[in-house]
Image (cartoon, rainbow, N blue to C red):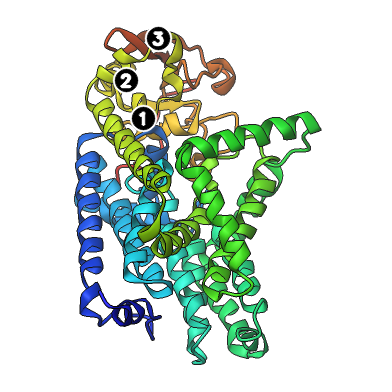
Amino acid sequence: MSEAALSLGRARSSGFWSIDTVVDLSTWPRRAIWFIATLTVVRLVIISATGLSDTESYYYVWSRFPALSYYDHPPMVAWMTAVTTLVSKSAFSARVGAVVCSALMGALVYRLAARLFSPRAGFLALVAVSTPPVLFFTSFLVNPESPLAPLWVLSLLLLDDLREHDEPWRPMLLGLTIGAAFLAKYTALLLVPVTLIFLATSRRTRRWLRRPSLYASGLVALTVASPVVIWNYQHHWPTLTLHLVERMSAPSGLTLWRHARHMVFDQFVLYQPLAFPGLLAILGVALARARTDARYRLLASASAPVLLFLFAVMVKVGDAEPHWTMVAFLPLAIAAGGWLDAHIDRASRALRVYLRACVGVSAAFFFVYFVHTQSPVVMRIIPPQLYSANVDAVNETFGWDRIQAAISDEAAKLGPNTVVAGGHNVLCGQVAARLDDRPHVYCPSPRRTEFDFLGRRDPPSDAPVVYVDSARYSENVSKLLPGRSCAQTQTVEVTRDGRALNTYRIYACPAVGAMGAAPGNRIGG
């Protein structure tokens, strides 16, 4: 390929949806399409062969109760699941929205990297963003990050448009996208400081800070995000209380250090031990080049401040989830594609081996994961003393035919007005999803959960209760169901290849008063 063709191929495209016209480089868009299509097929195979995890089932329950928002998260994950399960309530249907979002995110990652650097950089960024395990799992599980990811990348594309375009509608479109991202997850609020940092750090983009359309875009974002605001106002701001008060603590220095240590370890695991140091190195490259290169300034603005803020939050929150940082690593994967595009032709042997190892280790991990969901062969390889069933989310999908049969058997003995209850939100979600809310499922958890806002916290006093407990989510049934005399009637041991995975206990709890119809909506619709 001539230097002239390469230069044209790497030139920044004008306009949002324009495509590269250099014929020599047209192979990279085709490769990107095939790569996205192949990953989509893999994800479809996985979701067709595995059941919902406990947390996924909890989100699925939300989708059975249409609302402006929900206690733990904004409504998009529930709205999306409600649409995909209109015809079928299978795990495949519940997850297919996440797969579609993943394909869309891949296309947007390719588009942004190709615009900033080159079509080849777009393909390399696509590979980089598909390598970390955390991005693999969020690409097919029911989770708020699945719709957030493409909206985050789309926001960066629209933000980049402000560098060279002056139409007043462009900030409005950006505000609309940020508002939609906020409906996916509250982390999207960080796109506001990301936007201001990027615009304020260059004389060329500071012109937008003097234009009313930029500030009007904030009203657009707020309007789009208004369902969350309205729902919280109607319920006396429970989500703010949860995330800003209840989850926050005043830990000691030792606790902060322990949280920080765990967070770093979790990042190594979730972003793959080989790939994680490389992504941090790319962050250093992006920061170093940000002063002179607007492309890296955009990517550094969308990663470094977000990582810094989330790190500060995660070391303080005892139940922080390590995948929160996902959106901050998306721009780093794009920066990695740009850097590799410039260096891979003359890369050292060590770098080439490292890159192949990163992709190979992730591919092997994904293959082993799928095999593990279908066969106990992986468990046979791991020594029992090194295997913990409680941290293996695959185990959440096993044994439910027996558990469902045990619940149905006890409900039939207690009478037609019987309801079911559990002591933990995700366990209640799994039970409700498996039973299709027949009988109705309540969740008198010690902590407030979404079931409180669905009118499904305390079972009716005049209805008998089948209480479900597990070794993993064990609560004192007498405290959760005061005034009832509960007796354990069945025990379901869930094993796989001879190893104990979990123990479920079924209790029969007669009604407190006279029998009557149990109120409440059926989760099954």
Tag 1 secondary structure? helix
Of residues 451 and 246, the one nearer the viewer is 246
Residue annotated with mark 1: 431
**Mark 1 or 2, which is nearer the eye?**
1
Residue at screen point 54% across, 61% down? 188
Residue 264 is left or right of residue 361, and the answer is: right
The disc label shown at residue 384, or none? 3
Residue 38 is left or right of residue 258, and the answer is: left
Q: Is there a contact, CB below 8 Å, between mark 1 and mark 2?
A: yes
Can you tell which quarter of the image residue 365 is in? Answer: top left
Label 3, residues with CA under 10 Å away: few <14, some 14-19, many ≥20? few
Amino acid type of the residue that numbered disc 2 sits on in the rendered structure: Ile
Residue 300 is left or right of residue 433, and the answer is: right
Image vertical order of residue 404 relative to residue 340, above or below: above
Label 1, residues with CA under 10 Å away: few <14, some 14-19, many ≥20? many
Tag 2 secondary structure? helix
- Estimate the spatial distance between the alpha carbons at disc 1 and disc 3, rounded to whole Å: 28 Å
Label 1 or label 2, whichever comes before in sequence order: 2
Residue 203: x and y in percent read: 66, 85
Label 1 or label 3, whichever comes before in sequence order: 3
The disc label shown at residue 407, or none? 2
The disc label shown at residue 240, or none? none
Of residues 398 and 23, the one nearer the viewer is 23
Residue at screen point 32% across, 66% down? 120
Amino acid type of the residue that numbered disc 3 sits on in the rendered structure: Pro
Image vertical order of residue 126 relative to residue 133, above or below: below
**Mark 3 or 2, which is nearer the eye?**
3
Of residues 237 and 207, the one nearer the viewer is 207
Of residues 199 and 389, the one nearer the viewer is 199
Residue at screen point 69% across, 47% down? 312
Label 3 or label 2, whichever comes before in sequence order: 3
